[in-house]
Amino acid sequence: MSHLMSLLQIFVILSVVCTVISQRYDVCENSGLRYVYINEKLGWVGLGWAWTARYYRIHNLELEIEFATAKPDPNNLGSLQILTLVPTANNLNEMRWNMAYEWIFPTQNPLPDPIYIIWNDLYICNNTAAKTPEKPYVVKMRAVYNDYTKERSFTAEIIETPETKTTTTSAPVPLNVNAGTTDDSETVGCGKVDTTNIYVPLVLEGQTIERGQWPWLVSVYSYSNLKLGFRCGATLISNKLVVTAAHCFFDVNNRQVKSDDVLIILGQYNLKRPQDKVTKIVYPQSVNIHPDYQKLNKIDSDIAIVVIPERVRFTTYIRPACLWKGPETKTSLVGKTGFIAGWGRDENGNFFTVLPKQSKIPVVSDETCLRSNEAFVKITSEVTFCAGWRNGTEGPCNGDSGGPFVFEKDGRWTLRGVVSTSLLTDGGNTCNLNEYVVFTDVSQFTDWITSFDTDYTY
């Protein structure tokens, strides 16, 4: 770290005296990146900075650089590292967090040219003209720093050579975090799987799903005594909002978990690999419990909205489900089947499954549910509905709480239920799949849900 800080100090000094020594030049206009000559051993390095879009603290920092270069050494592609994150005023005198980073590249002649620089999904450099016959190789670097746990990760790979040319030649749609709606949202739409890359349809009953088959499935984690643990599933419904169950944010002593101790992972597939090339770890801007939850000690209005600080960029593996639209009452659902998915307890007794599974289950009437067991009187209401097979094996269980119950509606996968609660086995603390499962009826809360994003459109 002393080496890194010395580079940062050099960067600051050179910013002042650059007109004298002329050993520095800017790279990719208005990106904040500069090439600085350090010494004969290090040669040229890249030192850069970027602002956050808003003043709130971001715990998970992600920086990605894709650059064109002459033939690189596969065993030494260089390094990318986030150096500092400090609050300060920008040139408009607005308080923001400013990030400084260091990019070291072994290839010095010719120097590489950035194609994209992406800072927490915000494009700060977009230079697709960087690739030339002199620099036909494309390298992608990604540095992640968690300012909460102080953990770092770095990956680098050659993604295009003159022989393969496998990378895309145009950037994904840049995300304007200050815009109310984005081209990204309008292009992807809701409730659609990327069938150009995902070929398995959503019909595998009770089996492990393929990656990208449920791109709206989100995992919810929280810290307890500095230990991070999986809590619930959830559903991405826009580039700003996640829907889950309220009870996911209360501990065993019924104390609400602090928002600062919550994180969500978009695009997660393997619970043993929370961070990989296609996932996005997000610390919420806010966690919002419905005000009627646990009112009068009833388990009712079991729904919560997680607001994401920066609008996320959709990919094959991160896409929203549609939010239920229309006047249909829950009685119109009776007899219909929908899909649930999550990492919850399976038929073999595993408390969590490493990979998510899905099941197809039918909705039953409130009357059928109440007649099946008098205990449902205490855990159902006008804003819930029941579903399940009562066969002891298929359905959501412990660990599936908060997850989505979706139906195909007008050709799109649409969220209607949130996994809420079930009856327990006799003398145990596990779900009883010989009974129905209770879901929060999302359609009863659409106005409340969309109030957290005034730009949300169906």
Image: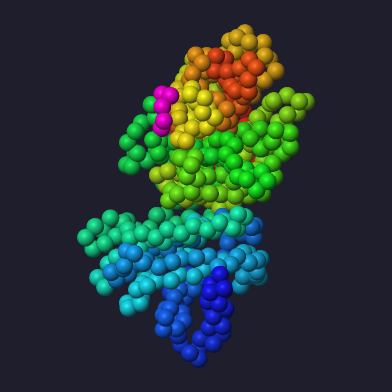
Q: Position of residue 24 (x, y in %)?
A: 46, 82
The percent coordinates of residue 331 (x first, y second) are 56, 17
Q: Is residue 354 visible?
A: yes
Task: Identify the residue at the far left of this view.
Answer: 163
The residue at 41%/61% (across/down) is 141
As drawn, is 8 to the left or to the right of 37?
Answer: right
Specify start and end residues of the magenta stretch as a single range. Answer: 205-209
| Pick the front one: 381 or 358 | 358
Give the number of marks: 0
On the picture, is 75 further left or further right than 437?
A: left
**Could you tell me residue 279's position as x and y percent?**
47, 47
Residue at image coords 46%, 66%: 80
Q: Nearer the viewer, residue 53 or 427?
A: 427
* Residue 442 vertical placement versus 126 (above, below): above
Q: Which quarter of the rendered picture does the N terminus lie within?
A: bottom right
In the displayed structure, 147 sits above or below 47; it is above
Where in the figure is residue 338, as x and y percent of width and height? 47, 24
Residue for point 52% across, 58% down: 152
Location of residue 251 by image quarter: top right
In the figure, is residue 87 to the left or right of 171? right
The answer to which of 264 and 305 lies nearer the viewer is 264
Residue 436 shows up from this direction: no
Residue at 59 percent of width and 37 percent of height: 231
Q: Is residue 320 above or below residue 328?
A: below
Colour scheme of the picture: rainbow
